[in-house]
Amino acid sequence: MVNAKEIYEQFCKDWKMIGSDLPWDSGATPWTKKIFQYFSDEGKKRNFKVYADSGMIAGTQEYMVDLCWSNEDKDKYYGLELAMESEWSEDEDEILYDFSKIVDIKSYLKIMIISVQEKKIRGIIDKMSSTVSEGKIKLPNEEYLIIIFTDDFEHAENERIGIIGFRMDNNGRYDKLPAYRFADGVLKGQEA
């Protein structure tokens, strides 16, 4: 079973290599493709069958969510290990709509990728927490990982872009993971 904190820390460590050539103002599609490619590669390394939006990962097909890791072999399906949704709109209703998809799906790790201003994070995380806590059907060991990309002008230019993570349990209790700030596409690795 994969662990939210471990996946997040590895993603942040690897982002400086995979995202170093990606300008923030390039739009959501290039960022989504890089992130999906990263999680697709990670799933394959861990011997999962990866399903993803074919517009983001060539040669694949979507299965219920934007990207998932399926535990299966040629003759048998064992279930989903990871389910991921991505919503780059800052519209709270759109974010929560996509988040509800991973709440409803059976998977041990559920990842939500969003991009919002830092001042909006607490409100969105609290609403996600409420959605999870009110959900009736849960796996005992399921975890949520919310990865938030921010572009905030309140920070100095060389620290304007950030990755902020939250781990949430199946009852909606959450804790903040280390945050990273960077500029010019290079992850600095300093706590925010």
Image (cartoon, rainbow, N blue to C red):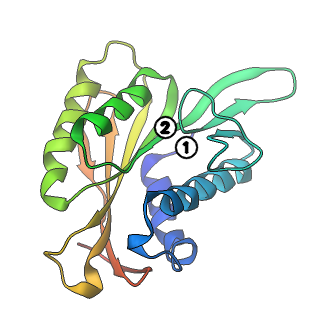
Contact (Cβ within 8 Å) of mark 1 with mark 2: yes
Residue 2, disc: 1
Residue 132 horizontal/vertical position (percent): 29, 27
Nearer-the-camera pick, 55 or 61: 55
Q: From the viewer's perspective, is residue 35 above or below residue 185?
A: above
What is the crowding at mark 2: few (fewer than 14 residues within 10 Å), some, or many (at least 20)? many
* Residue 139 is at least partly visible in this image: no
Circle nearer the viewer, 1 or 2: 2
Where residue 68 sits, quadrant-wise, is top right
* Residue 80 is at least partly visible in this image: yes
State the quadrant of the N terminus: top right
Farthest-out residue, top: 136
Residue 167 horizontal/vertical position (percent): 33, 46
Q: From the viewer's perspective, is residue 132 above or below residue 152?
A: above
Secondary structure found at label 2: strand
Question: Counting residues from the N terminus, which is met first, the one under dot 1 or under dot 2?
Answer: 1
Residue 64 horizontal/vertical position (percent): 56, 26
Secondary structure found at label 1: loop
The residue shown at (31%, 73%) is: 161
State the quadrant of the C terminus: bottom left
Nearer-the-camera pick, 22 or 16: 22
Tell me if 156 is positioned left or right of 181 in this view. left
Question: At label 2, which amino acid type do we have?
Answer: Leu
Residue under label 2: 109
Q: How many numbered discs?
A: 2
The residue shown at (51%, 55%) is: 32
